[in-house]
Image (cartoon, rainbow, N blue to C red):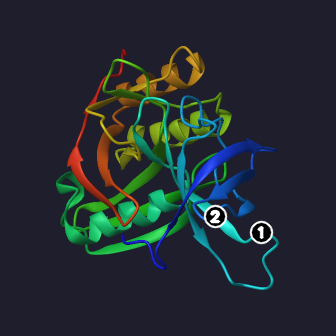
Amino acid sequence: MRFYPALEEARLIRRYKRFLADIETVSGELLTIHCPNTGSMLNCQVEGGQVWFSRSNDPKRKLPGTWEIGETPQGRLFCVNTGRANGLVEEALQAGVITELAGFTALKREVAYGQEKSRIDFRLEYPSGPAYVEVKSVTLGFDGTAVAAFPDAVTQRGAKHLRELAHLARDGIRAVQFYCVNLTGIDAVRPAEEIDWAYAEALREAVACGVEVLAYGVRLDHEEMVIDRRLDVRLNG
């Protein structure tokens, strides 16, 4: 996935009200742009750190740009825009990069399903039956380790999705939790038990019911993002 138009470089002044970020461009222009991330962005944002943003000329937009990439306090790059994850995964699925999910005959996005009235990110059709794939974007990293974690804040919605997947697996339907790790320098993923113990337990229970857990890393710079490698999953941290 290449960024088009090309991203512009700036430095972060501050992020506030969840969806707003003040930045200063290389030329000294001060802008308030959209921050497309509902999470806490724990261990990600650093005031004065480098950011890259996409600029919009749409007169209907209230803000002139969108924060796309940032630099963490550990010097890693991460994708701020959580909306990119599903596009990345679909691109990788269509290219056959995610070998565990290869061989599907049809792909549908945002399909209604489940006992709790959810929507699955992808429903893949195979000759043997469907597979339901839930995607989560991971950006939480730590000093001194190449292990990322999810979530970065308590997520009742995330636990709900795991319950839905577990229901499918119990009924013999293939169900997959997919972690798209939009953070450089990472080798493995774990549940962030210290942040959301209930989510970590729900993940382990889902696996016990037959839910598959996959994690893939992303090659990321200010020009493109590409899913390129399988990562380890450590259910017990």
Quarter occupied by residue 57: bottom right
Q: Residue at x 66, y 52 (%)?
A: 117
When the figure is inspected, residue 124 is found, relative to residue 42, above or below; the finding is below
- Mark 1 Cα within 10 Å, few/some/many (few <14, many 20+)? some
- What label sits on residue 63 in the rendered view? 1
Q: Nearer the viewer, residue 83 or 63?
A: 63
Q: Quadrant of the N terminus?
A: bottom left
Could you tell me residue 223's position as x and y percent? 37, 66
Hey, what amino acid is under mark 2?
Thr
Hey, what amino acid is under mark 1?
Leu
Pointers 2 and 1 in contact (C-beta within 8 Å): yes
**Numbered label tally:** 2
Could you tell me residue 159's position as x and y percent? 58, 33
- In the picture, measured across the screen, residue 83 lies left or right of residue 165, that is right
Could you tell me residue 67's position as x and y percent? 60, 58
Could you tell me residue 26's position as x and y percent? 57, 61
Quarter occupied by residue 230: top left
When the figure is inspected, residue 232 is found, relative to residue 12, above or below; the finding is above
Q: Which residue is mark 2?
A: 66
Q: Nearer the viewer, residue 103 or 197?
A: 197
